[in-house]
Amino acid sequence: MTESVPFVDIRNLTVTFTGGKKPVHAVGGVDLQVERGEVVALMGRNVRNEGVISARLGSVALSHVFEGVQLLLGDRLRSTSTVFSVEGPELSVIGDQGRLEQVLVNLIQNALDAMGSGGAIKVSVFESEGIVTLRITDTGPGIPQDVSKRLFQPFTSSKDDGLGLGLVICRDIMIDLGGDLALVPGGHGATFAVTLKLAR
């Protein structure tokens, strides 16, 4: 008789880096093997040995977030000859810098995986009626329609070796920050929209 697998709350994952693969220890004692770049969940400001800590909401300058992202991904952007650009007003949002970096790094890692070498990733910043939107657009092949409908469901991935938890975790983080994460349909490549409240 096959033993049933307990429900896993993916918001309470602890990721331990061990090299090429990372075992994810989830509640219920379930161990999952995650390929490099699938889940970016271990940053010193966000994760303790027991799991993901609660966000500390405050005013965060987006310029600082973008600087952190480029510091973390600079080597890979250069090695793949990827053009990375940010356009729009310099704004501050209500959020947590480390967790915002975590979400953006995951989205950009996914874009890099999809594009290969020589692509472009653009982050566009908009503000309307107190809501700030970051649109992250890449020049990759886009997301298949059948996958896009299930994209934020656990274990849905367009990668052959993907576990399908990264975007689910990212969306949970954004909701915890009082915002959201969504796929923008249409257009070339893939576009994701991250929304947050403007810090006044």
Image (spheres, rainbow, N blue to C red):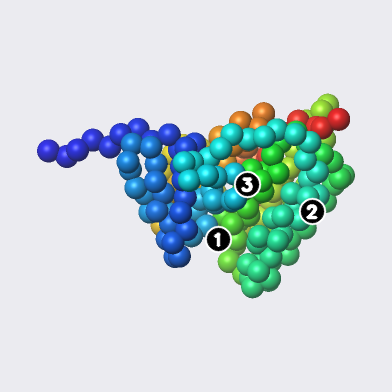
Q: Secondary structure at mark 1?
A: helix
Q: In the rendered view, does 123 fall on the left or right side of 174?
A: right
Q: CA distance from mark 3 to mark 2?
A: 24 Å
Q: Nearer the viewer, residue 116 or 180?
A: 180
Q: Nearer the viewer, residue 170 or 15?
A: 15
Kindly identify the amino acid type of the residue bearing the numbered disc 3: Arg
Q: Which residue is mark 3?
A: 45
Residue 86 has which mark?
2
User: Between disc 3 and disc 2, whose residue precedes?
Assistant: 3
Q: Which residue is mark 1?
A: 113
Q: CA distance from mark 1 to mark 3?
A: 25 Å
Label 3 CA crowd tier, 10 Å (few <14, some 14–19, many 20+): few
Residue 89 screen position, x and y as percent: 87, 44
Residue 40 has which mark?
none
Residue 199 screen position, x and y as percent: 82, 32
Residue drawn 66% across the image and 46% down it: 98
Q: Identify whether 159 is placed above or below 30.
A: below
Q: In the rendered view, does 151 fall on the left or right side of 99?
A: left
Q: Identify whether 38 is placed above or below 82.
A: above
Kindly identify the amino acid type of the residue bearing the numbered disc 2: Val
Q: Quadrant of residue 130?
A: top right
User: Between disc 1 and disc 3, whose residue precedes?
Assistant: 3
Q: Secondary structure at mark 3?
A: loop
Label 2 CA crowd tier, 10 Å (few <14, some 14–19, many 20+): some
